Image (cartoon, helix red, strand yellow):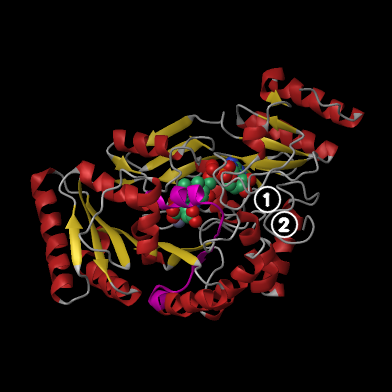
Amino acid sequence: MTRIQPPQTDEFLTQARAVLGTTHVLTTDLAAFATDWRGKFTGVPLAVLRPADTQQVAALVKLCAAHGVGIVPQGGNTSMCGGATPDGSGKQVVLSLSRLNRVRSIDPLNNTLTVEAGCVLQTLQELAAEHDRLFPLSLGAEGSCQIGGNIATNAGGVQVLRYGNTRDLVLGLEVVLADGQVLNLLRALRKDNTGYDLKHLFIGSEGTLGIVTAAVLKLFPAPHASTVAFAGFQTPQQALALLGLMRGALGDRFTAFELMSDASVALVRQYFPDTPALFAQTYPWQVLMQATDPGAGDGAQTALEASFQAALEQALEQGVIEDVLIATSVAQAEQLWAVRENISEAQQHDGHNIKHDMAVPVSSVAAFIDEVQPLLHGAYAGVRPIIYGHLGDGNLHFNVSRPPGWSTPDWQAESDRVNALVLDVVARYQGSFSAEHGLGQLKNHEMALYKTPLEIDVMRRVKAALDPQGLMNPGKFLPNGPF
Ligand code: FAD
Ligand code: 2HG
Ligand code: ZN
């Protein structure tokens, strides 16, 4: 396939090839880079550029600035909101970070790891484990998402309850600015009060302020003891009572608390038929819980299991839960985790769903669910809310699947109305309309609806200061125009 390019584009591509060599300036077979993970957005990249190091990124950004070419950074391309997908103009390049995948250093005494942006998350978890450390960021896409993408989206995942979001795990950054200068903030310090903490501007900015090329990450003691359980009960209120009870009993050893509606679990069993039935009867709500301890040896494992079990017995006695299954092997723990981690993919197989990765204060989650579910059922007979997520952080995936008989395009056309039904209630609870996945090109319109004009104005001023040409991931994050 050949594409005829206007002369100016030819010049741009010639210069890009001079920086990267011909092999890493792709202009054909771009489909994998042009469509998002959900298959919701497809763009037309001018080219895909694959730099190998920070200096090449800087040279390409300068070249784009000189030619007025928009840059869409792309890591593992697992964005849930079309953040890494270019528009249809054929005028934006995809800047793939995959080749920046070196580990620059590891310092076990300082508990830090310095890595390049294209390192796949799972490889970093494995590297930390080889050094008897934990890098705690953990999410379903960890086999393909990259640390640069995690930083750009301030990813959350299943251990935020104990270790915080990506923002809390980053000590330093290296960023290529919109004019091609390299901003070196790669400090491996736990304390540093020397002016504005600039790294936080770039974390969660979705590639709209600069390209993250490397980071210093925090490591933690490896969890040598671990235990996992699944519990069933009737109401979200019981989930909140259980959360309080388990945290009270286990403190910092309590690392994950993931809520799932029965409809979510049923969907996993439908699309992953090897998934076992966990309980003899169905429970409307279920949670997966995990506790870990850095203590080594059988003693630590036995002590952790004893505290975990005692807390669960108390929950059973108090009627907070009705049934519970505790994993007795690593394989069983993995089986329980698979039920939770496969929900997103099961939904993908099931067809289009209208996603809301919302958050409200943890204490309000049950009231929120009780308020929104009837609104949806009143508006759409047979609608299927697939509700699951990180209850310990007040963050749910309140994904609304189409009622039987509805086609995917008809359901997609309802997005604005369904969003308003759910997100207006989120706003009343002083919540967030995107607690994890970010804005990209899917949720940027909600900015104007749910943020104050002043908050948006301050963001626009930051954007204008750092990206005056509006070339960094144009059309994402903020509504209407480059900035
Ligand atoms: P991409 O999708 O490639 O890019 C995401 C955004 O970051 C884009 O705006 C892109 O332009 C920008 N970007 C990428 N790399 C850079 C860089 N080096 N510099 C500047 N900007 C950059 N998210 C959660 O928070 N929690 C979850 O539990 C979770 N689970 C998921 C499960 C599945 C099955 C899937 C498919 C996704 C999940 N996600 C989750 C969403 C997604 O994995 C995260 O947002 C992830 O952090 C994106 O990383 P990535 O490398 O794929 O980034
Ligand atoms: C999860 O927690 C991810 O599984 C994905 O954030 C959620 O697919 C989704 O909506
Ligand atoms: Zn999530």
Residue farthest top in this picture: 22
Across and down, in percent, residue 174 comes to 58, 41
Query: Looking at the figure, which quarter contains the C terminus?
Result: bottom right
Relative to 186, is 312 on the left or the right? left
SS at mark 2 in the image = helix
User: Residue at point 70% right, 73% down?
Assistant: 454
Q: Between residues 141 and 348, which one lies in front from this camera angle?
A: 348
Where is residue 18? Give x, y as percent. Answer: 76, 20
Q: Which residues are magenta?
A: 341-366
Residue nearest the viewer, comparing 159 with 395: 395
Q: Is residue 275 above or below residue 325?
A: above
In the rendered image, residue 125 lying in the magenta stretch gets the answer no
Q: Residue furthest front?
A: 405
- Badge 1 density bin: few <14, some 14–19, many ≥20, Cα 10 Å: many
Tag 2: residue type? Lys
The mark nearer the N terminus, 1 or 2, is: 1
- Residue at the location (47% across, 80% down)? 371
- Residue 364 lies left or right of residue 88; in this view the side is left
Which residue is found at the position 56% from the left and 44% from the top?
37
Considering depth in this image, is 331 or 364 the residue closer to the camera?
Answer: 331
Q: Is residue 346 magenta?
A: yes
| Marks 1 and 2 close (CB-CB < 8 Å) | yes
Give the residue type at disc 1.
Answer: Leu
Which label belongs to residue 463?
2
Q: Which residue is mark 1?
A: 209
Left or right, residue 420 beside residue 284: right
